[in-house]
Amino acid sequence: MNAIKPEPAKPRRLQPVENQSLPVQALPGANTHRSPGLTAEITAKLIVNVVLSTAAIATLMQLTPYALSQQAKLQEIQTEVQRTENRLKRLNDKLGRSFDPQQSRSVMQEQTDRVEPNKKNVFYLEKSREEPPSE
């Protein structure tokens, strides 16, 4: 185990760097001289974007009342559909009862005044109060 151990590295002192100026073109934002063509292009893009944004906002303002009226109509139609579905359900129940062989006689009696031959009608009569008591 007589291996050679490496010597620890000694920290080196850094020499202060003198303030070296970078070329003007390398600094960000230093390019203040723009060509007139680039300025015109940016201005044209901004104008087109403003015009398109204005047109989009105007169109949305015109379509908003129409969309609201369509939503109101849709709500009305949905309400009417719900009423019609309820009515349809009642009519289907009534139709099923009309064609049910076990209930056909009771349906016939409800819809007409006919009574089965083996049944008799019972009529209740009120007694008049002026009758003398029987002795």
Image (cartoon, rainbow, N blue to C red):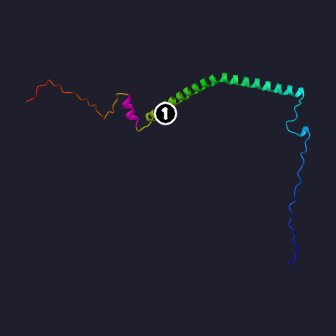
Q: Which residue is mark 1?
A: 89
Q: Main secondary structure of the magenta part?
A: helix
Q: Give the residue displayed 87% in from the left and 32% down from the top.
A: 32
Residue reaching furthest to the bottom: 1
Q: Quadrant of the N terminus?
A: bottom right
Say which of 87 and 24 sits in front: 24
Write the residue at 74% across / 26% down. Answer: 53
Q: Is residue 64 left or right of residue 55?
A: left
Q: Quadrant of the C terminus?
A: top left
Rendered position, 29 above or below 4? above
Whole-percent x and y of residue 11? Answer: 86, 61
| Residue 119 percent location from the top left of the image | 30, 34
Against 51, is 91 above or below?
Answer: below
The front one of 74 and 85 is 74
Return the x and y of residue 93 as percentages of the image width and height.
46, 35
Q: Nearer the viewer, residue 34 or 30?
A: 30
Label 1 crowding class (10 Å Cα cut-off): few <14, some 14-19, many 20+? few
Residue at 62%, 22% (x, y): give it.
65
Q: How many marks?
A: 1
| Left or right: 127, with 88 as reference point | left
The quadrant holding residue 94 is top left
Horizontally, residue 1 falls left or right of residue 92, namely right
- Taking the view exactly as shown, the residue that stands out farthest to the left is 135
Element type at mark 1 = helix
Bounds of the magenta segment: 103-111
From the viewer's perspective, is residue 125 above or below residue 27? above
Magenta span includes 40:
no
At which x and y percent is residue 34? 88, 30
Check residue 106 for magenta coloring.
yes
Q: Nearer the viewer, residue 57 or 25?
A: 25
Q: Amino acid at mark 1?
A: Lys
